[in-house]
Image: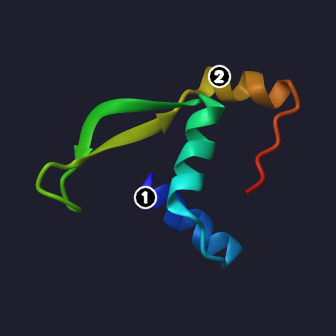
């Protein structure tokens, strides 16, 4: 999530509220947690996420539009 937030921050060239950003993405229900962890940012590691293509395509077909 942190990497995704950094990407959006760079693209939009604006500061994003971390809690709002994470809650917004979780509400879309097209990200799924993998069993892999990124161990570079902490000792415990952070789970990685991937896009559920089927859910995402269904939302796009329904007219989904993401805006922060």
Locate residue 21 relative to residue 45 in the image: left or right: right
Picture coordinates of residue 48 (x, y %)? 35, 42
The kind of secondary structure element at disc 2 is: helix
Picture coordinates of residue 61 (x, y %)? 84, 25
Mark 2, residue position:
55
* Residue at (75% x, 21% y) in the render: 58
Locate residue 49 relative to residue 59 in the image: left or right: left
* Residue at (24% x, 43% y) in the render: 37
Closest to the observer, 58 or 47: 47
The kind of secondary structure element at disc 1 is: helix
Mark earlier in primary sequence (1, 2): 1
Locate residue 60 relative to residue 34 in the image: left or right: right
Question: Residue 2: which numbered mark, if any?
Answer: 1
Q: Is residue 50 above or below residue 39?
A: above
Disc 1 packing (10 Å; few <14; some 14–19; many ≥20)? few
State the separation of the CA atoms marked 1 and 2: 22 Å
Picture coordinates of residue 24 (x, y %)? 63, 44
Quarter that holds the C terminus: bottom right
Q: Is residue 43 above or below residue 26?
A: below
The furthest residue to the left: 43
Q: Quadrant of residue 49?
A: top left
Viewer-side label of 1, 2: 1
Picture coordinates of residue 25 (x, y %)? 59, 43
Q: In this view, does 56 lie above or below 40?
A: above
Locate residue 67 relative to residue 25 in the image: left or right: right
Disc 2 packing (10 Å; few <14; some 14–19; many ≥20)? some
Closest to the observer, 23 or 55: 23
Q: Is residue 7 above or below residue 15?
A: above
């Amino acid at each position: 999530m942190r990497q995704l937030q950094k990407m959006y921050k760079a693209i939009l060239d604006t500061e994003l509220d971390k809690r709002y950003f994470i809650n917004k993405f979780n509400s879309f229900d097209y990200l799924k947690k993998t069993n892999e962890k990124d161990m570079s940012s902490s000792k415990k590691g952070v789970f990685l996420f991937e896009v559920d293509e089927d859910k995402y395509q269904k939302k796009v077909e329904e007219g989904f539009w993401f805006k922060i």
